Image: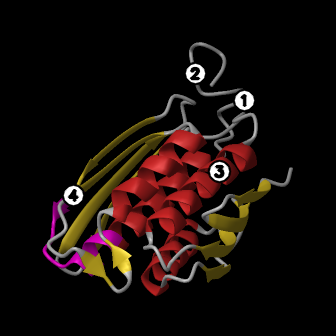
Amino acid sequence: MDRVANVKRKTNETDIGLTLNLDGSGKQTIATGIGFFDHMLSGFARHGFFDLEVRVKGDLEVDCHHTVEDTGIVLGTAIREAIGDKKGIRRFGSMILPMDETLALAAIDLSGRPYFVMDADFPTEKVGDMDTEMVREFFYAVSYTAGMNLHLKILSGYNSHHMIEALFKAFGKALDEATSFDPRITDVLSTKGSL
């Protein structure tokens, strides 16, 4: 069973094409027009062992908002589609990830019920050409379109680059765990019988 999704989304603000393979090796081809955002998506894919292709043409002459948020919408949609019926997957995933002075936590429940909590205050307004406030918007969009419960928290840290990168990597590791198969799970991991 291939767990691959191809999602396209075009609006007056962005034109996005994204391919996600949950059972990849961490290969990525990413071009959003925002160098730091490309770096973050690359870290997500590499550390989650997802193959990821992302092509975005956004209205960067305005700012980075639409490009980052809409990419989150498309990635969340791809995650939901690639997971499929959720039979046999672990459903839950978590990671506490260190990066230099930073310690970041990501916890996921692929419950089908979207909920998002983030506790992170970045000391700078931008990293490269990306507004740090867009980190929250990105992950909110991912969680709601994927139908996942997502908690993100910076436990310690003072460098915005490290803090954001640790969150993206921790998210990738947690998602890899949540989407992985457990031979003990023969249907879906729920007392209700559905997710």
Look at label 2 and name its amino acid: Ser
- Residue 190 - label: 2
Say if residue 95 shows up in the picture.
no
Q: Residue at x 26, y 71 (%)?
A: 163
In three-dimensional space, the C-alpha distance between marks 2 and 3, rounded to whole angstroms, equals 19 Å
Q: Is residue 51 left or right of residue 172?
A: right
Q: Are marks 1 and 2 in contact (CB under 8 Å)?
A: no
Q: Secondary structure at mark 2?
A: loop
The kind of secondary structure element at disc 3 is helix
Residue 25 vertical position relative to residue 179 in the rendered view, above or below: below
Residue to which mark 3 is pinned: 79
Disc 3 residue crowd, few under 14, some 14–19, many 20+, Cα 10 Å = many
Bounds of the magenta segment: 154-164
Number of other residues with Cα within 10 Å of mark 1, as a class: few under 14, some 14 to 19, many 20 or more = few
Of residues 185 and 17, the one nearer the viewer is 17
Q: Residue at x 57, y 30 (%)?
A: 112
